Each structure stands twice: as structure tokens, then as C-alpha cells.
Amino acid sequence: MSSTDTTANPEYAPFFGVLGAASAVVFSALGAAYGTARSGTGIAAMAVMRPELIMKCIIPVVMAGIVAIYGLVVAILIASSLKAAKDGYSLYLGFVHMGAGLAVGLAGLAAGFAIGIVGDAGVRGTAQQPRLFVGMILILIFSEVLGLYGLIIAVFMYANNSV
């Protein structure tokens, strides 16, 4: 089969790659937005009682933003290898790119939800009992690593896409 064979490389094949790139950004950004918003409300409530802790308790917001960067990295990888089906972009490659985008995007969504919930409760609790800060950070790290798992799988899928 040649690289221009329409059965191996249908015209709609790049659609799945584009869908993967979009999924990576959209879902990871949704997770980051939720984590930022939820943690931010906790910080605002905490700042009423203990305004000196605002900068210390901004960590959940930063960690939520990192989740969006994971999706951006994978989307850039996918977008950089997109091309027309007539130029050799196969259906298989489109599905791999879609899977990679969904892996990092949905993992980022889950991580953002976890960071938001832990960050909200953690900063409110830290305002009342400062010894909770270290525990909050540890739980946030375990929440963040969920997004990192998605990034690792997505990069692995992207790198190993040979037939």
C-alpha cells in the first residue's frame, strides 16, 4: 500500500488527531479551572481570618495551573505532527493521537477536581490549625500526580505510534 492509499489513510483521519489535541487542552484546562476556582474560594474565606497566610496557601492554585500545562504540552506535540491524509496521516495515527489527548485531558480533569477539593478544605483548615499545612501539601502532591500519570501515558503513546 502506498501512503496515498485512501483505505489506509482516509480523508477524515486527521480529524481524530485534532480531536485529541483539543481534548488534551480542553479537559486539562477544565480541571485546572475547577481546581483554581475551588481553591480560590477557600483562600478567600481563609484570608478573612488569617490574611498573613494568603501567599503560603496559594500553592493549590499553582498546582492546578500545572495540570493545564500538561495538556498544553501534549496538544502541541499532537498538533506539530498533524498533516493531511494524502500526506500520510493514517487513521491509526489519528486514533493514537486521540487516545493520547484523552489520556492527559481526562487525567488532568480528575487531578484538577482533586486539587480543588483538597485545596479548599486544606487552606480553610490551615487557617484554624497551621500544622495541617504539611498534610495538605502531601495530599495535593498525590492529587497532582494523577495528572502526571496521564501526561506520561500520553507521551508514551505519542512516541510509540509505529504500526
Image (cartoon, rainbow, N blue to C red):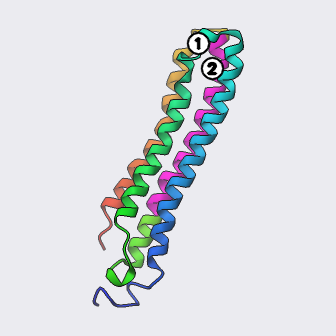
- Residue 153 or 6: which is nearer the viewer? 6
Return the x and y of residue 150 as percentages of the image width and height: 46, 49
* Magenta-drawn stretch, dominant element (helix, strand or loop): helix
Numbered tag placed on residue 123 in the rendering: 2
The N terminus lies in quadrant? bottom left
Q: Secondary structure at mark 1?
A: helix
Q: Is residue 67 left or right of residue 109?
A: left
Vertical relation: 61 (above or below) 79: above
Write the residue at 59% across / 16% down. 54
Q: Secondary structure at mark 2?
A: helix
The residue indicated by pointer 1 is 53
Write the residue at 51% across / 16% down. 134
Answer few, some or many: residues within 10 Å of disc 2's Cα (few below 14, many 20 plus, some between 14 and 19): many
Q: Are marks 1 and 2 in contact (CB under 8 Å)?
A: yes
Answer few, some or many: residues within 10 Å of disc 1's Cα (few below 14, many 20 plus, some between 14 and 19): some
Q: Is residue 99 left or right of residue 136?
A: left
Question: Which region shows up in magenta?
Answer: 99-127
The C terminus lies in quadrant? bottom left
Amino acid type of disc 1? Leu
Write the residue at 60% across / 35% down. 36
